[in-house]
Amino acid sequence: MSSVPGVTEEGHALASAAPAFLKGHGTQNDFIVLLDPDGTFGLNERQAWALCDRRQGLGADGVLRAVPADGGGWFMDYRNADGSVAEMCGNGARVFALALRDAGLVTVDEFVVPTRGGDRSVRFLDGDVIVGMGAATTSARAVTVSAGRGEWAATSVWVPNPHAVAFVDDLADPGSLSNAPDVTPADAFPDGVNVEFVVPRAADRIAMRVHERGVGETRSCGTGAVAAAWAWRRRSDALSEDVPPTIRVDVPGGTVWVTEHSGGELDLKGPAVIVARGVIDEHWWRERA
Amino acid sequence: MSSVPGVTEEGHALASAAPAFLKGHGTQNDFIVLLDPDGTFGLNERQAWALCDRRQGLGADGVLRAVPADGGGWFMDYRNADGSVAEMCGNGARVFALALRDAGLVTVDEFVVPTRGGDRSVRFLDGDVIVGMGAATTSARAVTVSAGRGEWAATSVWVPNPHAVAFVDDLADPGSLSNAPDVTPADAFPDGVNVEFVVPRAADRIAMRVHERGVGETRSCGTGAVAAAWAWRRRSDALSEDVPPTIRVDVPGGTVWVTEHSGGELDLKGPAVIVARGVIDEHWWRERA
């Protein structure tokens, strides 16, 4: 038996027509991990947003379905709280990796998680999880972000999902982020964009708030932290020739660390927590199939 | 085996040092029901608010712990999302009753749930759950409620938890209820008060919004619906001699029905939904013990 009650070591929910789940969070970015060892449950847009509904569902920032990957391992089928498909999420990948190990689907300390954003390495170290985030790319095109009464020049960063990183004087400056900040030009990010507001604290330390497309302001965003640290290292180049490779990023939900390796590869390190395990109600699941 | 995975028919979580749970809602007032068949898990203030935290925990408006009652049956140990102890919750009692039956702890269609607000009868009927709410009491003392830019005379109703019911022209009039409305005189409700804003729709139908003490604005409040219907029947006495005994109450999260019986006893009827079942993580639980 796995540690998920009523679930076998292979991730099969015993005598249930609905998937087993784990609920957890990484720096308060919270996720439902669904186990779909045969790929029979699937996960449609309606099920994803209904599961993420914080009153009628179980409640989360997103759903991560674990389904066998064609090339081996467990594919991370990630959907946002509004049900939309997403490429990759650094905090989600940590929770996903911990859930796979917790459910007994993975028994090693280092493995690969295939995602829509490509294969990601994960590694457990001293209670934290380190996720390989690949390299970041940018665009020379000028982008402007406005929120509250402020307007800022922003750096475009793809990790590979799109981010606009704006450096501000104070994290309170953008005001409420319950609505998405305006990003111009409108066609800079045809698939929408996550927006980070960043305040430098030291050469190796920044703090940020984030508005995630399709979700709203969240307590943390893994790719957002990577984008912010990447942009900060480029920006701080002008200030110092000795920028450290590892940047501490304080988010409202906690702290993560971003390391840039010599080849441009970026790692995200941070905590992951499992709160509960169980099985979705069959009737509830079928009604939304 | 009960239908909760990894839990026996007696509600014992197999090989776990943390309680089994069910997550569900009644008209979008959502609850975590904890099964504590031996009374060994308990439920302290910290565990309750941590469980209800919608990002670091499982997320809910409140926790309902099922523990054997001295006189038989399952006592509903109810705590609000801030961890504070509460007497009774009509929506919670429906979810609690459905969870007891779902977990196999109760097998009949009609039974009694002991609560801090007294023994409550529950009955399953055509997919809904009917909860006996006892009689309401009031006070002749004039009470005033203010929210947004409005101020209204309110009726005090105890069910037996305290309510201030204000009739308004439009449900939008009180504005945002993210902060508690002001209720004067300040000593009218020494233990705090739930505030209902009510708009009549017909002789037998009202609509309301509610601010619950210790929680904020919620999608529904069972005792609040009872208080509102009770106050409406008194108020409508002046308008009609033929006030129907059953009042439909539309809340943001759905619809419930309140019936006043000839002896003054009030019933609350409405839906209850179970979304998922499982077991709280042992390490997470112990850290908050």
Image (spheres, coloured by chain):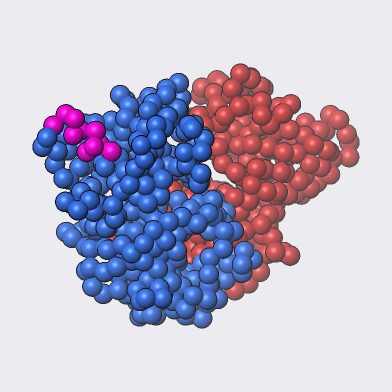
Chain colours: A blue, B red
x and y percentages locating residue B222 in the rendered image: 62, 46
The part of the chain drawn in magenta is A231-240
Q: Nearer the viewer, residue A51 or B191?
A: A51
In which image quadrant can residue A194 be found? Answer: top left
- Relative to residue B67, is residue B91 drawn left or right? right
Report the quarter where the C terminus of chain A lies: bottom right
Q: Nearer the viewer, residue A93 or B50?
A: A93
Inspect this view and state whether residue A185 appears. yes
Report the quarter where the N terminus of chain A lies: bottom left
x and y percentages locating residue A176 in the rendered image: 45, 30
Q: Residue at x 37, y 51 (%)?
A: A160
x and y percentages locating residue B192 in the rendered image: 50, 32
Outermost residue to the front: A140
- Relative to residue A126, is residue B278 drawn left or right? right
Inspect this view and state whether residue B77 appears. no
x and y percentages locating residue A57 in the rendered image: 54, 56
Magenta stretch: includes residue A232: yes
Q: Residue at x 46, y 25 (%)?
A: A148
Q: Residue at x 41, y 32 (%)?
A: A143
Outermost residue to the left: A242
Magenta portion: prevailing SS class: helix
Q: Where B36 falls versus A89 (above or below)? A: below
Q: Residue at x 29, y 68 (%)?
A: A112
Magenta stretch: includes residue B225: no
Q: Where B283 falls versus B15 (above or below)? A: above
Q: Nearer the viewer, residue B277 or B137?
A: B277
